[in-house]
Image (cartoon, helix red, strand yellow):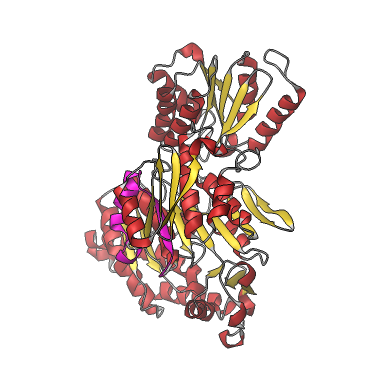
Amino acid sequence: MTIPAAAADAEPEFASPTITASRRLVGANLFGVSPGAVIEVAVTDDNGARAVEQWPFMARDLAQALGWDTSQFQSRHGVRSASCYLSAPLDELMTATALAEQAWVLSEAYVAATKAPEAGPPATDVIVDMLRRGGARERAAMPRLRELAVAAREHGVAFTFDDEAATVGMGRGACAFALDRIAPSSEIDWSCVRDIPAVLVTGSNGKTTTTRLIAAMFRAAGYATGWNCSDGVRIESDRGSRELAAGDYTGPMGARLVIRDREVQAAVLETARGALLRRGLAITRATVAVITNISADHFGEYGVNSLSDLADAKAIVSHALQDTGLLVLNADDAELVALATRLPAPVQSRIVWFSTRADRPLVAESVRRIGYGAESVADVLQLCARGEWYEIGPLTGMPLTAAGAARHNVENVTAAALTACCAGVPMPAVQETLHRFGRDAHDNAGRLQWYRLADVTAVIDYAHNSEGMRALCATALSVPALRRLLVIGQAGNREDAQLRDLATSAWNAMPFDHVIVKDLPSLWRGRAAGEVPAIIAHALHDAGVPADRITQAPTEFDALRDALRWAKAGDMLVLPTHAERTRVTTYLAELQHAGWRAGEPLP
């Protein structure tokens, strides 16, 4: 990967040049349930490895000097990198990041001193004084934050905070305070503070579809429902639909917008890997969490270098389940089956399994222990809730499954149906939603969204990793067409191997008649212009794609127009869309409305 060099006179971002990232973790995280701070460090030789080993001791000494006697310290080794974490008080997290960085500087100095004893041990008095002053300023800015968090836990309600406000309870039961004006716990009317049903949705693929589907089930049951996903934040109720934000809101900000809205009676929160690793979990309590699946993506970021690491990152959502919440897992996913054995015993006892196959022993076990589970028998969805089995109906009759051809959506509807039932949605609302959701293109915008032009078919999807691409191509292959074209591209924050795998997965799934490799300028993320398309095009060539079947386009919209110019009557255009979806879908809708036919000039 090509990363632009910093300007020679630029101010160093961190206390040591080997620190590559430093951030606060405001909730449960990869290291445990406590907020804290984490730094990422480059480890290129034995000195770096020894500094990582020394870091917990330096961090402990600094933390104890500040009076943080209960802090915990962990290090996770990656590929030529490491993550160093310490837990810290809620109201001193900025100080904690500075402490983590200074502990690393001291660790490097200690290692250097062991090789050159004349340098002497590093001095810490100045560092401790700086940290004390920083901590005092933070505490003064939010004087009752810790007290509020403890009170929320004692009253059994959710707690969340950001740089501006702290909130106890959720939705209609939420009570929010500006950080500098938090009321004493004794003056809060806790009888009015309560939680609402809250579902956390994570996984590698299918998160947004599953989130939207569960939200629709809650709405069908009469709840004023709020949800956040990779397309924004919405509230739907008897008063209509409100968009609170547009764009990718799968992090803590999106979750807080939902649970702080006083109209909301049920919350469905898409929770992405990046947000969990960068900031931790936004809320402390949830009714149900679901992990849809695990597949290779984003390796090399935030200490995630394997499928096992990725599964552990997704499992952060389980920390919010408290004593009664259920964790819904995919019994067909080997990584999730393995993950279940690594989870704490109390969480293991509350795992509910689903499968798109029949007679999975794990499903039978969760039904026996907890009374919940779901599976497909002869392509009919069967769902067990509170110990009673229900036949939901043929999967081919559910619009999202494209008459059963979209096997990835068979997985999504199964996961959503079981999760909604576990969260208390009545069975009739689940069943009605499954047989309706997806008929309207706006139900699941940008996900397996079909456009029937006069004589050309186009399908839009968010497929962004090799497993998602395989699923999209398999669905497209099941629909008759004379020729098929694929537009393919990727953001720059993937390893070269993942970019190559994306290309070969597509070609192995279906030998397309033409492939357009698109560049995504808004998603270069440190890459040079044209770098990602070059890697993908080379991988396609290595996979056996003839050179005359591959072209390149400078943007996603340019790729769409090139695809339409290529098309003839009876063709299908497969269009994974990531950067310019609104522009792409609006343009296709205009062509559809105008009755555009292949071969005609494009507007």
The image shows residue 483, relative to residue 329, as above or below, that is: above
Q: Quadrant of the C terminus?
A: top right
**In the depicted structure, whether residue 187 falls above or below residue 290:** below
**Residue visible at 38% across and 49% down in the picture:** 310
The answer to which image quadrant residue 117 occupies is bottom left
Between 247 and 40, the residue placed more toward the observer is 247
Image position, residue 577 (x, y; %): 58, 34
Please check the rendered image and state whether residue 223 is part of the magenta-colored stretch, yes or no: no
Q: Quadrant of residue 572 in the image?
A: top right
On the rendered image, what quadrant is the N terminus found in? top left
Residue 475 vs residue 519, the one in the foreground: 475
> Can I make out residue 492 in this image?
no
Q: Residue 470 appears at what percent x and percent y? A: 44, 31
Q: Give the magenta part as a residue range.
A: 323-348
Residue located at (57% from left, 74% from top): 194
Name the residue at 66% across, 17% down. 455
For this view, does 238 lie left or right of residue 225?
right
Which residue is farthest bottom? 186
Q: Where is residue 291 in the image (x, y as percent from the top left)?
A: 43, 51
Residue 237 point in image, percent of width and height: 69, 58
Q: Residue at x 61, y 72 (%)?
A: 173
Q: Residue 132: in sight, yes or no?
A: yes
> On the picture, is 492 further left or further right than 601?
left
Observer-nearest residue: 151 or 357? 357
- Judged left or right of residue 517, residue 563 is right
